[in-house]
Amino acid sequence: MTTQRRGIHLDQSELLCKKGCGFYGNTGWQGLCSKCWREENQKEKQKQIQEDWALAERLQREEEEAYSRHQKAQTQPTITPFSKFEERKTKEKSSKVNTVTKFFTPSTKTPPKKDTPFDAHSSPSPSSSTSRHSSVGSDYATREFIDFLKPLKSGREIFKQCRAFTESMVYKRDMGADELSECVQDFYQNLSDRLHTQFKGSSDHVESVMDEVEKYMMTRLYKDVFCPETTDDERKDLAIQKRIRALHWVTIEMLCVPVDEEIAEVSDSVVKAITDVIEMDSKCVPKEKLACITRCSKHIFNAIKISKKEAASADDFLPTLIYIVLKANPPRLQSNIQYITRFSNPSRLMTGEDGYYFTNMCCAVAFIEKLDGQSLNLSSEEFDLYMSGQASPHWPQSSGASSCSPGSATLSQVHKRLDVLTGLGERQERVMEKARQLESDLIDWTDEVEQKVQSVLESIPAETQNPTATTASGTTSAASSAIDSDNVENEHLPPPLLPQVFAG
Amino acid sequence: MTSRLSLPVTMSAMRVDAKVVMLGKESVGKTSLVERYVHHRFLVGPYQNTIGAAFVAKPIQVGEKVITLGIWDTAGSERYEAMSRIYYRGARAAIVCYDLTDSSSFQRARFWVKELQNCEEHCKIYLCGTKSDLIGGDRSLRQIDYHDTQDFADEIGALHFETSSKTGNNVDELFQRVAEDYNSTALQYMTAEETGVDLGQKKDSYFYSCCHNN
C-alpha cells in the first residue's frame, strides 16, 4: 500500500525489484520482491545459524580446556570453576535470546531479519511480551497469525497494527465494556476499509484476513475482555442459570416443540445439540463460539426434520432451540452472548448464517427471561405453583425413558437413600463389635504385660552387669572397623594416616 | 507478484450482502414462499430430503452485478412477539406476509409494519399476500381487498405483491424487486461513502509519507 502511494511521484522502474527479476519490490524488503527477499534472507539466516554453531563450539572447547587446566592445577580449585560457571551462564543467556527470536520469527523458511517488525518487537521489551504471551494458546495464535500473513503483501503492516492495538488494549482494562467494544469495532472497521482499497474490492480476501485478525486479537484479549469486572455480566449469568434451573418442569408440549425424542436418531441429535451449545463456553474466538451455535442449530434442524418428516421452518426451530437451552443450561450464557455481540466482526453478526442462528439464540434467552404462564398456555396460578415447586405439571404417560418422568426419579432416589441407611446400620454394628473386641484385647494385654514384668523382675538380680559390658565392647570394635573400611574407599583422604594413629 | 500471492480462503458460509426478514403470522406460508423461490417447488404433504429453510443465502443477478440476499425466516407465533425486534435489527428489507383468505393475519401484518416504522427506518417494507391460487379458484374466499391493501401500501411507502407459492405466481418478481431496490440504495450509499473515503485517504497518505520520510 505504501509503495502504491509513493508510486504517484516515483518512476515506474524504481518500484521494481532491485534484483531485476521483473516483479515489484517493496521498501520494507529493502526494495526486493518477496521471492528475492526470501532467498536473500535465507542466506543471511543460514550464516547466522552457522555463526551461532561456531560460537557454541568455541565456548565448549574453552570450557573443556579450562576444566582440564583445573584438574592439573589443584592449588586454586575454587576460582576457575566459578568463572566457568559465569561463562556458561552468559552462554545460556545468549542461546535463550536466540530461541526467543526464533520463536517470533515465523519459521526457518522465511525468517525476517532483525530489522523486520516480526522479531523487532521481542527484543525491546522481552519481559512485557513474555508476560503477555503467558498462555500457550495465545502464543500459538500469534504464530498462526504470522504464518497466515506471511504471503500477503502488507502482512507485516497488518501484524504490526494488530499487535500494537492489542497491546494498547491492556492499558484500557479499566474502561467500560461498551467502550472497549467500540475500540475493537472501530479498529475492525478501519482495517477492513483499508484492506478493501488494497485488495480492490475483493470482499472474500478481506473477510478471510479479518477472520484471522479477529482470531489473533481475541485469543490474546480473551482473558481481559470476557466477562469483565466492569460489567454485571456475571450477575446476569447467575440469574439466567437460576432461572433455567427453576424452569426444569417445562415440557416439550408446553413449548410446542415438534420433536419426538422416542426416535433414537432424534434423541441423538438432541444430545449433540446440547453438547454443542455447552461447548460454546470453551472457545475463545467469537467466530468459534458462533460456529458452536450454528452446529447446535443444524442438529436441531435434523431432529425436527426426522420428527416431522418435512422441512423445518422458523416456527419449529425457535421453540426447539428454547427447549435445548433449557435442557442444556449452558455455562456463562449471558457473558458469551455479550462477548460475541461486543467483539465479533459486525458483518458476520448482522447478515450471515451464523448471525441468523445467533439472533435466534438471543431470542431464546430473551424468551426464557420473560417467560410467563401465558407463553406456555398455562394460567398464571398454575405457573406460580410450578415455579415455587409446590406442584408439578401432569406428566404425559406417553413420554418415554428419555423425557425423564419425575415420579420414578424420586422413587429411585428414595430407594437409594434406604440402601444407604441399611448400609450405615450394618457398619455401625460392625464398629460396635470391633469396639467390644478391642476392649477384651486390652484387658488381655494388660494381663500379659503384668506377667512379663513379673518374670523380668524375677530374673534381674542374677544378670545385671555382664550383658551391658559385652554389648558395649562389641559395638565399638564394629564402629572402628567401619570407619576403617570407609577410609579405605575414600581416595581423596590419605588412607595410611588413621590406622597409624590407631596402631600407635 | 499477484500470481505468487496465495491467500488461503476459508469461507465456511456464503458472504451475504443484505439481510431480508420474513415476517408474518404462523402458517401464512412464509416458509413455502422461500422454498418456492429458492428451490422452485411447492411441497405438499409429508416430504423428505429438504433441509430447513429458516436461513437461505440466495445470489440474484441484478444487471451486471450479483447481489446475495440472506433471507431470514422468523417465528410468527404471538408468544414470540416481544422478541421480533431482535430479528429485524439491521434488516435492509422486510417481507410482511399475510394470508389473503385470513383477515386476522392482515391485522398481524399491520402490527409488524408499525414496529418496523418505529424501529427500523432503513428497512424497506414489502407487503405480500399469499395463497392467491386459492382465491383464483373461489373469489368468495378472499377476505383482504386488493385496493384497500394498495392504499395501505401507498400510505406507508411500501410495495404490494399478491403471490402464490403453489403456482409460483409473482414470487420471483417479489424477490427480484427486493434485490434491485437494495442495489439502487446501496449505490447511493456507496457514492456517499466514497467521498468520505477520499478524505480519509488523504489523511492516510499524509500519515504514511511522514512516517517513511523519517
Image (cartoon, coloured by chain):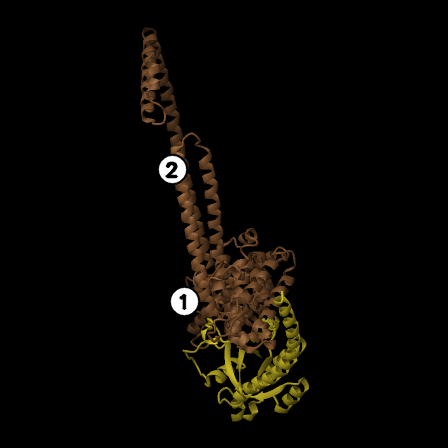
Chain colours: A brown, B yellow
Residue that mark 2 sits on: A68
Can residue A502 be seen at all in this image of the molecule? yes
Q: Residue furthest top?
A: A461
- The subunit letter for the residue under badge 1 reads A
The amino acid type, in three-letter code, at marker 1 is Glu
The residue sitting at 36% across, 14% down in the picture is A453
Q: Which x, y percent locates residue A27?
A: 55, 69
Can you tell which quarter of the image residue A176 is in? Answer: bottom right
Q: Which x, y percent locates residue B3?
A: 45, 76
Q: Which mark is residue A262?
A: 1
Is there CB contact under 8 Å for labels 1 and 2? no
Task: Tell me the CA gap for discs 1 and 2.
Answer: 82 Å
Q: Which x, y percent locates residue A120?
A: 54, 58
For residue A355, above or below residue B149: above
The residue sitting at 48% across, 41% down in the picture is A86
Under tag 1, what secondary structure?
loop
Name the residue nearer the viewer: A78 or A312: A78
Can you tell which quarter of the image residue A2 is in? Answer: bottom right
Q: Closer to the observer: label 1 or label 2?
A: 2
Quadrant holding the C terminus of chain B: bottom right
